[in-house]
Image (spheres, rainbow, N blue to C red):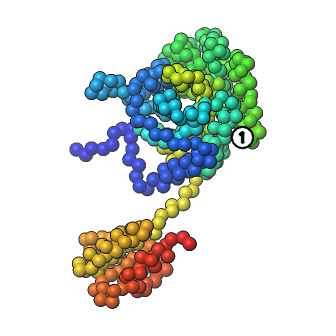
Amino acid sequence: MIITNTRGTQDILPADMMYWHHIETTARSIFNIYHYQEIRTPIFEQSELFERGLGNDTDIVSKEMYTFLDKGNRSLTLRPEGTASIARAVIQHPQLTKHNQAKLYYCGPMFRYERPQAGRFRQFHQIGVENIGNAHPFTDAEVISLGLHLFDELGIPGLSVSINSVGCPVCRPVIQERLKQFIGNTLKHLCGDCNRRFDQNPLRILDCKNDTCRTYFTGLPDIHKSLCHDCKDHFNSVVEYLDSLGVPFDIDPKLVRGLDYYTKTTFEIVSDKLGAQNALCGGGRYDNLVRKMGGKDTPAVGFAFGVERAVMILKEFSEIVKREDPLIFVAPIGFNQQTRCFHLMNELRRAGLKCEMDYSKEDLKSQLKIADKMEASYCLIFGEEEAERNEIILKDFKKRSQDSHPIDHIVEILTQKITPQ
């Protein structure tokens, strides 16, 4: 029986890597402009980290985490998202916030047990940013602007922002009570998840994706009318700053996101070219998470996006030019010339030139066929006659020309041809 990859995972093949590299390189470039630094956290953490950080009643914790006992009988979990690990790292490494602020980004695999579908996997990859230590609404606007800058640079059209405020511990109870009063009469028509959330965290009912449930949400009370003075001022400032930057946005009172740690601002960057599933990334402010983990009061805001879905979108909307270094194929004619060519190939690689050689073929015709299949730009032909003259033939496939050169100078000649001046 042939063993295949586990359901919900995928092999990222060489043909797709140019998209991954383009996204990762562009992200790192943009993050550097905004003065964010990379951090890498472990792929697995103590299970309590996510249970406390994300909330036990969230779908991630209650249904989707890959949790196991290690040989020391400790409960560990493959990370389902990145923010909780960053918060733990900030507490554990005080030097990260020695200037009272940490601007961090991450890139890596996450794990959730959910139904695989297009662009969604059980092992998936996220890129995210976290701005930790600053409560000013300018920070929210900066993070949102950064995300727009990134997706614009990637070439994704029709960008805008959906934004909301979910309040804080002061006004959240008022918001939840108003929601419970509105939803209470229709609760019997809602799904099991909504019924469970009604008592545990009624605000998260708004995150339900069930179409039947959402029909009962029409006429919901406006969350913003229940916000405390501080949350209202913060939200109004964020949208004012976005407006001053020319950022297109819509206020979506149902946008609460699926994690318990969010406070005040929640947002998604969307594209009107993507249909119903139009969100590119999501994030928001989480001012209480670090304290909840055992640290001090530390305001923070960030976002994350799935790389797999970004790759799907790029394939549809953004033309990426595949840039590869020219390939030099080294073709020894006859067994006696292979050793010299093997040494030459090492010299070419040491000079930073990409080259290849087939060890199984000795005749020129077969080797030229291989060079053609590899889409080589040049071929170096070295036979008995060339060895006697201490020369080598340089064949240029694009110009359809060839000429002889001293073999001792061929590395320098090819470097001048290939290296941009």
* Image position of 256 with respect to 180: above or below: below
- Residue that label 1 marks: 247
Residue depicted at 47% across the width and 74% down the height: 415
248 or 67: which is nearer to us? 67
Quarter residue 254 falls in: top right
Quarter residue 204 falls in: top right
* Image position of 129 with respect to 19: above or below: above
156 or 136: which is nearer to us? 136
Residue depicted at 51% across the width and 61% down the height: 322
Residue type, numbered disc 1: Val
In percent of width and height, residue 119 lies at 48, 41
In percent of width and height, residue 226 lies at 70, 16
In percent of width and height, residue 385 lies at 30, 88
Please indicate, yes or no, whether residue 49 appears anywhere in the rendered image.
Answer: yes
Please indicate, yes or no, whether residue 375 appears anywhere in the rendered image.
Answer: no
Q: What is the secondary structure assignment of the residue under circle 1?
A: loop
Residue depicted at 50% across the width and 22% down the height: 293
3 or 283: which is nearer to us? 283
With 64 as the anchor, is 168 left or right in this view? right
Quadrant, the N terminus:
top left
With 363 as the anchor, is 265 left or right in this view? right
